[in-house]
Amino acid sequence: MDKKTFKQELLDELYAPYQQCMKCPLGSLGRTHVVFGTGNPDADLMLIGEGPGNEEDKQGKPFVGRSGQLLTKLLHSVGIERHDTFITNIVKCRPPNNRKPFPIESSTCKAILLIKQIKIIRPRLICTLGATALECLLDKPVKITQARGKEFLFENIKVIATYHPAYILRNPKEVEPMLNDLTKVASLLGLISGG
Ligand code: URA
């Protein structure tokens, strides 16, 4: 069995007991799907957002709504194809009215799913999208305007922080710094020179 198939099997085994997860309050707050994540189980790059929105909850896939479409476009523009990456969120269930996940929700989901996904995939690089994702990984508050473009470590894996694409939809002028961060990601992965 090749590495990719093996990792996909490990991911499937990880998800199986959580199809109807009730480990945190989000389980009973109206979610339709537990959105585990999609993409290459042997990806060099793992992208982590905050939590599923309405469209993601309906389809059971992360980043398929407006911000997801923008993310796919921005990645492509720096030479990263979405299907080569693995995309997931801090919490796998949609918070009501797209509110920020509460600490008990993100810490529970991090412990039972996110950390285990990272350990199975073992990407070369993690890119966090927005403050919530970085704060949850680092377990401390961050100012995303200061943290973006910077490098951190999680489980000995390099983490690059950037903005959440939903922030770019609201503030289109900020696309340039986000593209700079993604260019850095592509360059660290050896997809482009410089950056
Ligand atoms: N926002 C997120 O943080 N994640 C998604 O999957 C969609 C929107």
Image: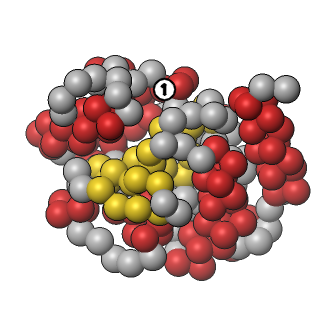
Residue at point 69% right, 58% down? 116
Using the image, determine if residue 93 lies above or below residue 177. below
Where residue 135 sits: x, y (%)? 40, 69
- Image quarter hosting the N terminus: top right
Where residue 26 sits: x, y (%)? 67, 66
Where residue 88 sits: x, y (%)? 56, 46
Give the left or right position of residue 31, taking residue 75 as reference. Answer: right
Give the left or right position of residue 49, taking residue 186 as reference. Answer: right
Q: Is mark 1 within 8 Å of ligand 1?
A: no
Using the image, determine if residue 30 lies above or below residue 57. below
Residue toward you, 39 or 118: 118
Residue 58 visible at all: no
Residue toward you, 127 or 27: 127
Give the left or right position of residue 113, taking residue 6 as reference. Answer: left
- Image quarter hosting the C terminus: top left
Give the structural element (helix, strand or loop) at label 1.
helix
Residue toward you, 79 or 65: 79
The image quarter in which residue 10 lies: top right
Where residue 48 sits: x, y (%)? 48, 50
Q: Which residue type carries mark 1?
A: Arg
Residue at point 76% right, 71% down? 23
Disc 1: CA contacts within 10 A as few (<14), some (14-19) or many (>=20): some
Residue at point 88% right, 56% down? 17
The image quarter in which residue 9 lies: top right
Give the left or right position of residue 54, taking residue 59 as reference. Answer: left
Give the residue number, with chain letter if any, for mark 1.
82
Residue 44 visible at all: yes
Using the image, determine if residue 137 lies above or below residue 166. below
The image quarter in which residue 4 lies: top right
Number of marks drawn: 1
Coloring applied to the structure:
secondary structure
Residue at point 18% right, 60% down? 145
